């Protein structure tokens, strides 16, 4: 199928780089793929990029992109192609072909079963005991005990904490669903964070005095879990999954309480964290005396 014939390839790559999209790294990945393979902006180029995303990636140690990572790259490519069609001289045939490529670029649905991403309480304790980096260890403990998102932890500043008699109250302002919530944090944990990271603007400050990088922290947690627990694919967010799963498993709290703690809707919490199901034996036991 033809390229955008009225614009040469170097110019189309330059045009794509001027288009603003939310995901800058994913945008550059798409453009570099087209450029390195001399594909230009075409049906074949978009299709080839999609197929490449589905393959095991060397940058991921031979693993495939997860649904969320795949969808970010899809969204960036989708936005670039649509904007390019609006800005570049495109024939009706080319427009039809690119629309067809976009329609083929389907998003992926995440796996709702998160059991393989949950660490047991024993594994959490073992991880904290074996982690040799005090900065990373206290971050892992904070992420697990508060059940917060990695973005919320890295955005936390000392002024968000209010001291009470038995704990600190952390007011989380910038949340995924834009609803502020409050979480209790142990005083001893806060004291260790201050001791290890100092008292800069952020709770977790990088060596250069600014906030820490999310990708770096997640990567270090992944490496540490793989090294000490021999578990692969465990990210910082899995600590949140683990904490919420452990709370749900106690059976002491209703779904509304769990949702308030997590900063999620009750529907989302029920979908992801109510893992307990009646066994067949328990189901049959409830039928005794009912004539079944």
Image (cartoon, rainbow, N blue to C red):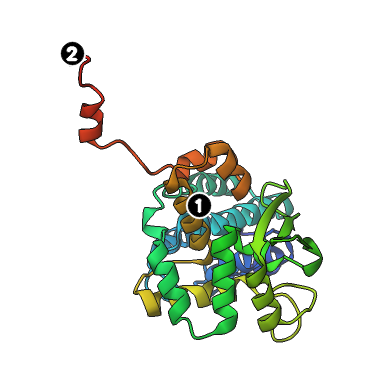
Q: Residue at x 20, y 16 (%)?
A: 289
Q: Residue at x 59, y 73 (%)?
A: 139
Q: Position of residue 252 (x, y in %)?
A: 48, 42
Q: Where is mark 1, residue-wise? A: 244
Q: Is residue 203 above or below residue 275?
A: below
Q: Is residue 190 visible?
A: yes
Q: Residue at x 39, y 44 (%)?
A: 275
Q: Is residue 292 above or below residue 2?
A: above
Q: Quadrant of residue 210?
A: bottom right
Q: Position of residue 182 (x, y in %)?
A: 71, 52
286 left or right of 200? left
191 left or right of 38? right
Q: Is residue 7 visible?
A: no
Q: Is residue 111 above or below residue 3?
A: above
State how many labels appear.
2
- Measure how far apart labels 1 and 2 are at the Cα level: 39 Å
Q: Which mark is residue 291?
A: 2
């Amino acid at each position: 199928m033809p390229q955008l014939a009225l614009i040469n390839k170097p110019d189309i790559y330059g045009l794509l780089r001027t288009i603003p999209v939310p995901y800058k790294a994913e945008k550059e990945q798409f453009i570099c793929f087209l450029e390195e393979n001399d594909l230009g902006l075409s049906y074949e180029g978009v299709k080839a990029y999609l197929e490449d995303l589905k393959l095991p990636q060397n940058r991921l140690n031979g693993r495939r992109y997860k649904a969320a990572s795949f969808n970010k790259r899809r969204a960036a490519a989708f936005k670039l192609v649509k904007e390019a069609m609006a800005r570049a001289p495109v024939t009706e045939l080319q427009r039809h072909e690119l629309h067809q490529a976009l329609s083929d670029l389907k998003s992926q649905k995440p796996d709702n079963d998160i059991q393989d991403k949950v660490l047991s309480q024993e594994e959490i304790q073992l991880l904290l005991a074996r982690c040799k980096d005090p900065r990373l260890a206290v971050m892992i403990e904070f992420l697990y005990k508060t059940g917060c998102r990695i973005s919320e932890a890295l955005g936390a500043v000392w002024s968000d904490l209010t001291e009470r008699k038995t704990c600190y109250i952390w007011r989380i302002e910038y949340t995924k669903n834009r609803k502020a919530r409050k979480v209790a944090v142990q005083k001893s944990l806060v004291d260790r964070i201050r001791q290890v990271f100092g008292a800069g603007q952020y709770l977790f400050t990088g060596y250069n005095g600014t906030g820490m990088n999310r990708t770096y922290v997640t990567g270090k947690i992944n490496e540490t879990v793989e090294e000490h627990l021999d578990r692969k694919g465990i990210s910082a967010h899995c600590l949140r999954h683990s904490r919420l799963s452990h709370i749900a498993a106690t059976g002491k709290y209703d779904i509304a309480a769990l949702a308030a703690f997590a900063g999620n809707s009750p529907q989302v919490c029920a979908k992801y964290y109510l893992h307990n199901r009646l066994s067949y034996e328990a189901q049959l036991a409830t039928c005794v005396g009912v004539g079944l």
